[in-house]
Image (cartoon, rainbow, N blue to C red):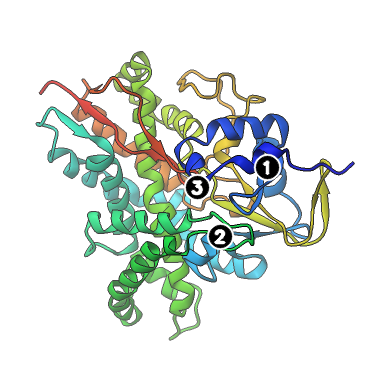
Amino acid sequence: MTMTSPDWIADITMEELEQNPYPFYERLRKEAPLAYVPALGCYVASTKEMCKRIAGADDGDFEGIIAPAGRRTFGDPAVLDANGEQHDELRAMVDPGLQPSQVDRYVDGLARPIARRYLEQFENDGHADLVAQFCEPVSVRSLGDLMGLQSVSSDKLREWFRKLNVSFTNAGVDADGNFANPDGFIPGDEAKAEIREILDPLLDKWTVEPDDSALSHWLHDGMPEGQVRDRETIYPNVFVYLLGAMQEPGHAMASTIAGLLTRPDQLERVIDDPSLIRRAITEAVRWTSPIWSATARRSTKDLTIDGVELPAGSVVMMSYGSANHDESDYDDPSRYDLDRTPIPNLAFGAGKHACAGTYFATEVVRIGLEELFEAIPNLESNTDSETDYWGWGFRSPLEVPVEWEV
């Protein structure tokens, strides 16, 4: 029997997904775990089982791809959009410095001084918005310095990922399948032009004077003597990093703090026992996944999955944020709970295209929270209203306002 998408799916708008995707995806999980969503112009996998099935499907059935707005934002070849030998080559370019054994070698010396430096700017104020003043700056500065972008300010790095995010999430399509808002790509195009202008001289320098920065390694590692990778291979993956990898640790950190603030007793336990920080992070990225819906696969032939016909070339978006609220695995999934039974989540993706920087991101978050809770152990929320979140592709708190007695 062939299944069709329920009529109500056509009523969802991009604005609703960006503001609060949870009710829509909850209904998808119950009624249509794999369904075509007109607003996104693609199929959506919403349950944990379906996300894992599509992400791990045989390469003869699916190939990795990013949604059209992602391809328009990053260009080609981006590691998220590559397959086969090309994917292996790009992962070989970006993965080595992100292996746990390598991260352990440098991450403390990289991230801890950065976290301390930002804390010194406000720890005596008695109040702060931790997203703008701590979480995002620590995140972008840590990855920026690792990449070799010490000359680029943290504010500029934050501006770049916000502009790229506007383009990446500009996924709305009209009845003809065209982008409904072409102007939505202007911010990303502006950021990319500026990135190239700033990075070209740095790449020129690293071509003749290699150093230990990630981008220098991207140029040289695995290349024949005297040759470097061409920039049209480098830049799409720089854009991927400056969007996803720049914001992911900061937003995971912000969501951890926001989640703990909903459970003051659990916040107190974590502050008293820093060994609980890793558990707190794991629950936070399940509760509000920083990468909510950002990866997809495309069917290479006509397929039928659980009664849903997928013509060859169908794009299926894996909604990992939805999978992490799947009631089949998680009781009361909308509640942050440090003591939740630890069940693996999909916050960092699944399959070949799972996030390469999972360990690095988690360690930056851990170090940032260790420093924050040591410096300000009497942290409290300074608002009675619920935290505002935004985004369906990448999702995070807009602000985390806190106060403390100095």
Disc number at residue 52? 1
Tell me the residue that label 2 is attached to: 80
Q: Is residue 324 visible?
A: no
Q: Quadrant of residue 84?
A: bottom right
Name the secondary structure under disc 3.
loop
Quadrant of the frame with the C terminus: top left
Mark closest to the chain's N terminus, 1 or 2: 1
Which amino acid, mark 1?
Lys
Name the secondary structure under disc 2.
helix
**Image height of 322 relative to 310, above or below:** above
Quadrant of the frame with the N terminus: top right
Crowding near pointer 2: few (<14 within 10 Å), some, many (20+)? many
Q: CA distance from mark 3 to mark 2?
A: 14 Å
Crowding near pointer 3: few (<14 within 10 Å), some, many (20+)? many
- Of 347 and 16, nearer the camera is 16
Which amino acid, mark 2?
Leu
Residue positioned 61% across, 40% down in the render: 11
**Image height of 48 relative to 72, above or below:** above
Q: CA distance from mark 1 to mark 2?
A: 17 Å
Question: Residue 162, percent across and down?
Answer: 35, 54
Tell me the residue that label 3 is attached to: 393
Query: Does the CB distance between marks 3 and 2 fall below 8 Å?
Result: no
Mark closest to the chain's N terminus, 3 or 1: 1
Question: Residue 128, percent across and down?
Answer: 19, 33
Q: Residue furthest right?
A: 1
Name the secondary structure under disc 1.
helix
